[in-house]
Amino acid sequence: NLEQSTKPITTFEFNHDLCLLKDGCDYSQVDFAHKYIGGGVLDQGCVQEEILFVCCPELIVSKLICAKLADNEAIVITGIEQYNEYSGYAEKFKWQCSHEDRQNRDKYGRRFRQILAMDALYFHWSNKKSQYEKNKIDREICKA
């Protein structure tokens, strides 16, 4: 309950110079996920989440073990390795070549990369004002 909480929201650093997948290796990366993690990666999707999943195919396993995200849930996946390079986006997406991931490893041998998957609500243009309703704002803040 955000109204009754006395805990402050923690600070974080945001680097707006990083792009989709290529520059975020040393950071936790956010997957703006579908409520069913992976979205259309095994079907016809080819935007941000699906590109992340085909470049780091270990993520596809999460489709098998993760349920639909609830309003108060996010998923953290640690140790992701990138195997593919790409160019383009959506209908212009194209596999480029194999990728040799040189990211450092943690003490468990996992790549030092974390993915935070969280779904945002979709607000159709015909009802975009609803995103400012208190319950919708609270939900999005709790996700983040």
Image (spheres, rainbow, N blue to C red):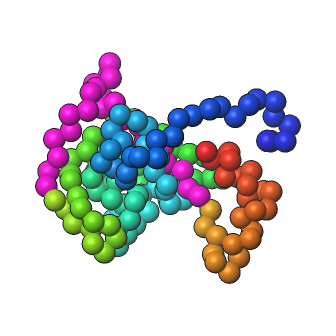
Q: Which residue is depicted at the point 69% across and 72% down?
A: 128
Q: Quadrant of residue 103?
A: top left
Magenta stretch: residue 112 in it? yes
Q: Nearer the viewer, residue 116 or 132?
A: 132
Closest to the observer, 22 or 55:
22
- Asked if residue 58 is positioned above or below residue 124 in the image, the reply reads above
Quarter of the image where the C terminus is located: top right
Q: In this rendering, would 127 be left or right of 45?
A: right
Residue drawn where x is 27% and y is 52% of the image: 55
As drawn, 88 above or below 71? below
State the residue at coordinates (63%, 52%).
70
Q: Locate residue 48 relative to residue 93 in the image: left or right.
A: right
Left of 103 or right of it: where is 59? right
Residue 113 appears in which quarter of the rendering? top left
Q: In which quadrant is the N terminus drawn?
A: top right
Numbered circles on residues, count? 0
Residue 86 position, x and y percent, is 23, 58
Q: Residue furthest left?
A: 97
Question: Extreme bottom residue here?
Answer: 126
Is any part of residue 65 visible from this angle?
no
Q: Is residue 3 above or below residue 69?
A: above
What x and y, as percent, mark residue 11?
62, 32
In the displayed structure, would residue 110 be above or below residue 126? above
Find out whether residue 103 is within the magenta segment.
yes
* Range of magenta residues: 97-120
- How far from the left and from the top, in percent, is residue 120? 59, 58
Q: Answer yes or no: is residue 129 visible.
A: yes
Picture coordinates of residue 85, whole percent (x, y)? 21, 53
In front here: 136 or 57? 136
